[in-house]
Amino acid sequence: MTVSSERQIIYPDSDGQPMADNTKQFRWIVLLKENLECLFAQNPDVFVAGDLLWYPVEGNPEIRVAPDVFVVFGRQKGDRGSYRQWLEDNIAPQVVFEILSPGNTLKEMLKKQQFYDRYGVEEYYIYNPENNELTGLQRLEDSLTVIEEIKNWTSPRLGIRFVVTPETLEVYYPDGTPFLTTIELKQRADSAESELAFIKQFLEQQGIEIPTMDGKSY
């Protein structure tokens, strides 16, 4: 292949498919992606993405997939139009999540599993919010193998814990706090702010000065 022909290869940033087929699927994608961002916010070398095309092979733009959420250890944070593995020290995403919708077919999911198996994914999680079914696969002896006991499972790579209850899937940070939606985070922040205001008012009523970060008092 000549240099000129190499330059003509285009790696599209979109596959033309919607990120989600319904609100429930979208809500789960956002929940996982945003909480994983929070989990690794202080680590500059963990890249988290949602609905981003992954090209594992240079020169073959037809070999691609857009996981709902994926995590890459060893790659810097930052904006990307797509994840081209050869430009990323050839590091494949280690953990991948797929959230099923009624439109997903068995053939489609089998193809994705084969793709992730072939190109080095270490952990692959599939959640169906319609029937509350979680499936997990872990790389053992160079192939993805089904995790038999998944209902109370801790991800070796991420440290997060999955708990399947009769009603839903619960996901917990390594410290035991639950993954929360944006609304739940806002409610928790508002509650904490109200509690601090109450404590401040109480201390002021008692004539107790409250020191600030600069050493002064209110």
Image (cartoon, grey):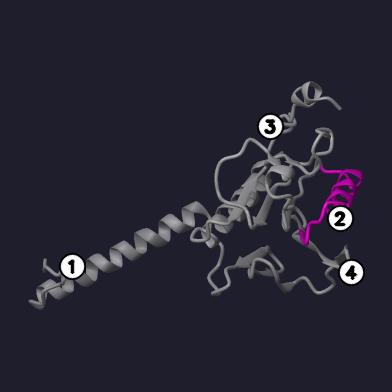
Q: Position of residue 79 (x, y in %)?
A: 56, 41
Against 113, residue 162 (above or below) is below
Q: CA distance from mark 4 to mark 1?
A: 56 Å
Q: Nearer the viewer, residue 197 or 1?
A: 1
> Which numbered disc, 4 or 1, marks the residue closer to the eye?
4
Which residue lies at the image location 38% right of the left edge and 60% below the top edge?
189
- The reply to whether dot 1 and dot 2 touch (C-beta < 8 Å) is no
The quadrant of the image that shows the C terminus is bottom left
Which of the labelled discs sits on residue 13, or is there none?
Answer: 3
Q: Quadrant of residue 210?
A: bottom left
Q: Residue flagged by tag 2: what amino acid is it?
A: Asp
Image side of residue 105 versus residue 205, left or right: right
Q: Distance between the Cα atoms at labels 3 and 4? A: 33 Å
Q: Please, what secondary structure does the residue beneath circle 3 have? A: loop
Question: Which tag, 1 or 2, sits closer to the chain's start?
Answer: 2
Report, in whole angstroms, how far the alpha carbon at label 3 lies from the one at label 1: 48 Å
* Residue 212, label in figure: 1
> How far, Cα to Cα, is label 3 from label 2?
23 Å
Mark 3 or mark 1, earlier in chain = 3
**Type of the residue with mark 3:** Asp
Q: Residue beneath label 2, please?
A: 117
Q: Which residue is mark 4?
A: 141
Q: Quadrant of the N terminus?
A: top right
Q: Earlier in the sequence, mark 4 or mark 1?
A: 4
Residue neighbourhood size for the residue with mark 2, other residues' Cα within 10 Å, grouped as few (<14), some (14–19), many (≥20): many
Magenta range: 104-124
Q: Earlier in the sequence, mark 3 or mark 2?
A: 3
Query: Mainly helix, strand or loop, the magenta region?
Result: helix
Which secondary structure lies at badge 4? loop
Query: Is label 1 or label 2 in front?
Result: 2
Q: Are marks 4 and 1 in contact (CB under 8 Å)?
A: no
